[in-house]
Amino acid sequence: MKTENKRLIKLKFSQTTLLFALIMMLVVAITCVSPSFLTWRNIRNVFMQNAITGIIVASMTIVMIAGGIDLAVGNQLSFLGCLLAVLINKGIPEGWSVLIVLAISTLLCAISGLIIANTTAQPFIITLGFMSVYKALALITAGGSDIPIRSFQWLGQTQLLGVIIPVWIFLFLFLIVALVLQFTKFGRSVYSLGSNEQAAYISGIPVKRLKVIVYAINGLFIGLAAAAMLSRLGSAVPTMADGYEMTVIAACAIGGITLTGGEGSALGSFLGLLFLGIVRNGLNMMSVPTFYQYLVNGTIIVIAVLLSNYNSRKKA
Amino acid sequence: MREKILQLKNISKAFPGVQALEEVNFDLETGEVHCIVGGNGAGKSTLIKILAGVYSPDGGEILLDGVRYERFTPHISRDLGIQTIYQETLLAPTLSVAENIFLGDSLINRNGVVKWKEIRARAKEILDLLEVDIDIDAKVRDLGIAGKQAVQIAKALANESRIMIFDEPTASFGRKEVDNLFKIIRTLKQRGVGIIYISHRIEEVFEIADRISVFKDGKSVAHHDSKEGLAFNTLIHEMVGRSTNQFYDRERVPVGGVVLEVENLRGSDVNGISFSLKRGEVLGIGGMVGSKRTELLRLIFGADRLLSGTVTYKGKTFQPKSPLQMMKKGFCMVTEDRAITGLLMKRSLKENIMICKYSKFPQMFLNMKEEERITRAEMERLSIKAKSPDQLVLNLSGGNQQKAILAKWLLTNGDIFIMDEPTRGIDIAAKEDLYQLIVEIAKNGGSVILVSSDMPELVCMSDRILIMKDGSLAGELLQENISEENIIRVIVGG
């Protein structure tokens, strides 16, 4: 029995282990080409560059394990950034402005959650619609131009132990999500919902309420990401987070989450994000032109997902 | 004149840890029905999959029309005219019957245009041949299970299949559907089609078989060239390796006072049903497939929208609103379909067993040690065979999956058990374990509502039987009147 247990644990780890090995190989390869890659400064850079998307990857992990998806996260982030800039520039105290934005963001995502929970509409399509709505809201709020903020930069600039606060927020939230998914009843319900909604419902899991909560959490995290991003950039641009949803979903997918839900883990998504971040950083260091970066990025996503797919099929 | 079309010689197949087939011999003649019976894990499914080209045998040979093959591929298998009729139909639900019958066949003219006239005419011809009354323009998703099966058979005929394999074809059929299927099978026989028929239902095997092979633990343990003089019990003895009565002899438990009163329950398919349930009682619900028994159970459990009616339980009258609400009151629901409404297939046994307990009782954090302990205890108590609590339920046998479902409800300490076809598709040994568990529930003061299409099961397990017809109650049989004949009489009569 004992050895059997060990074997299962090993199998469970194999997907993330594979990803971890890939990341290591990548690190070695990039370091060979440009030795300055493996410096504290640059590693810190990788985390700084990915902190904002990372916050959303954390909540998207929950959404996607629950069998949902949210395509609107990028545009919603842009919109909230603009909204926060307007509020702060209006002279509303920073704390209140952030709270207002967090509340609005949570509410907005809860609304998409309500629609998804109470109809048979696909989350993919519903959030695709919202994507466009938020794009418009961002442009309307900003009045078509950028909004420099007069204060609030401290959050994005202040360093704690040599690392800016947004990185700490990202790491902290990720840790929370990992713990919640692994050790709480809520986390278990999320896996159950994604694994088999009907069985979960019959087994007494309030699936509708759970869906709303899951999306609302996503909203809360987007709000936090918006505050961090605005503070970091010092100015709200209505298109500042366009296309972020792609990176976020790709990170989750590389980390082993499928569109059907019910599998994957916070650690997997974290490694997925790290992988993408290192690739981008490495390409920059090797001064690969942006046009080609897209090509490399896309190819890597496809290959990584194929690999993890192959791996999980072998497991079953 | 009958001739041998298929011969399997010394076929073996091993999977990690299991010898699924061991030196199995089997043959099939044209125009005969060769039945294979055996418990779960007997190797029937593996044999089918070898014939369908899904698995390659480790050893042995396959002779088809005297030509020797080491293995099939799905393609070769289909080209040679071997077709499996599965329980879960592999049809395109949104296409018409005619389109499905000729799906994948290039009935197109030189310009690449579909020959609709010919497709419809030939589809009609085949269905007429089978004497099935199905509209060729109907969408497949609108057909019942039996209709879908008939379309699959028609499709196999259109492909000029010479060997058809039926894998548990009647698992959710009532008597009428079975009769229709057997009529079709007899037509197929006359046309020289060789039929391999696999079923748990011994009485049906006796009815349709020309020859019977018994499989057990990957071996072909017995073979009967004719059913003349063959006794039920002989076959069952060969299947389980011990003697058992075809009618399970359950221990009777004294039935107490009324605990549940269902009044005038009405849903989109259920037309005002009232009945009562007593303490320690096993209340059977019989009826044809499509008589809306599952729908009634779902209404009682709050899983579907209730239009009107109430439930009175422990002195309180209320309307079932959600499974969570009913679960908290002490109701348990063992659903009909393990993969769809029963289990989280891709998750571990542990997670599946704990799910209801967690839903019912307030608690924020998981207790991993406790989970492990409880799961092991349940595995022991219900003799669930799994490698460990972390094994995916997907990899458990049907019987063990069913026990896992029961286990997760037993852990909620409920006392009204609603069970929908709890022994469907599981072997006799596992069935008897489940029967024992049902009796155990009754003994402990619980009550059971049991829906079953398995007549002997309904007859031997129930203290009282309600019979449903088209969403309404058609009759009630008290203990002394319970018999298969009486059930059928209520179903058929008026």
Image (tube, coloured by chain):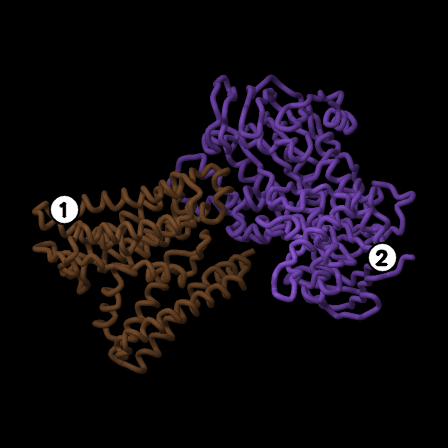
Chain colours: A brown, B purple
In front of the other: label 1 or label 2? 2
Image quarter (top left, top right, bottom left or bottom right) of the C terminus of chain B: top right
Q: Amino acid at mark 1?
A: Gly
Q: Residue at x 22, y 46 (%)?
A: A102
Q: Which mark is residue A95?
A: 1
**Chain at numbered mark 2:** B
x then y, percent, for residue B184: 78, 45
Q: Amino acid at mark 2?
A: Thr
Q: Residue at x 27, y 77 (%)?
A: A289
Q: Please tell me which residue lies in front, B458 or A76.
A: A76
Q: Is residue B315 left or right of residue B95?
A: left
Tell me the SS state at disc 2: loop
Q: Please tell me which residue lies in front, B427 or A118.
A: A118
Q: Please tell me how crowded label 2 is: few (under 14), some (14-19), or many (20+) other residues with Cα within 10 Å.
A: many
Q: CA distance from mark 1 to mark 2?
A: 83 Å
Q: What residue sits right under mark 2 in the picture? A: B30
x then y, percent, for residue A170: 26, 57
Q: Please tell me how crowded label 1 is: few (under 14), some (14-19), or many (20+) other residues with Cα within 10 Å.
A: few
